[in-house]
Amino acid sequence: MDFQERIDGDIKEAMKARQATRLGVLRMLKSALKNAAIEQGGAEARLDEASAQAVLRKEAKKRQDSIEGFTKGGRQDLADKEQEELGVLSDYLPKQLSPEELEALVSSVMAELGATSKAQMGLVMKAATEKVAGRADGRTVSALVSSKLG
């Protein structure tokens, strides 16, 4: 069963269980996946797993940004709603790297490339981002690489 089939099955389960929030988030995700597929190859196209995961990460990132904005704006009610939606999306995201795992990964990338100065940050970020593959936030990776090179 691929990712999109799993979402379809979970939509049916959410309908049967009358889980309104979960159902709404899954429908939104299905719509985003369908829109991305249409952009790539027309109405009958399906996304591969990597593209589907990229759409999922993009939707989760939208929720994180909204939570930050609503919290800064003093709208905790809306931030809580976005947090609940992010919780549903998190069930489908790959397991995130721990800070120790991330630091080890960045250190190994720097050793492979022989990077020692800030001038090489772009090279390190490119290689580290490929190895992280969505299991850590880009800002976190960038901050870690910057501190190790600085």
Image (cartoon, rainbow, N blue to C red):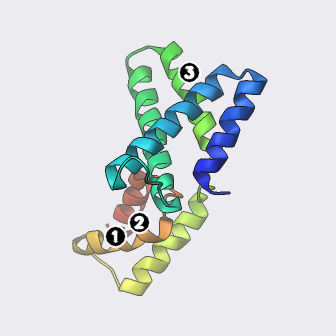
Residue under label 3: 80
- Secondary structure of the residue carrying tag 3 is helix
Question: In 3D space, how far apart are the residues under numbered discs 1 and 3 (Cα atoms)?
Answer: 34 Å
Query: 74 and 63: which one is in front?
Result: 63
Q: Nearer the viewer, residue 29 or 58?
A: 29
Residue sitting at 52 percent across and 26 percent down? Answer: 82
Residue 129 circle label: 2
First-in-chain label (3 vs 2): 3
Residue that extends furthest to the right in the rendered view of this protein: 17
Q: Is residue 99 visible?
A: yes
Q: Which residue is mark 1?
A: 126
The residue lying furthest to the left in this view is 119
Can see residue 93? Answer: no
- Tag 2: amino acid: Thr
Q: Measure the C-alpha gap from mark 3 to mark 2.
A: 30 Å
Report the amino acid beneath label 3.
Asp
Helix, strand or loop under label 1: helix
Q: Mark 1 vs mark 3: which is more N-terminal?
A: 3
Residue 34 coordinates in the image, percent (x, y): 45, 43
Instruction: Give the position of the C terminus as an image quadrant.
Output: bottom left
Kindly state the secondary structure of the residue where label 2 is placed. helix
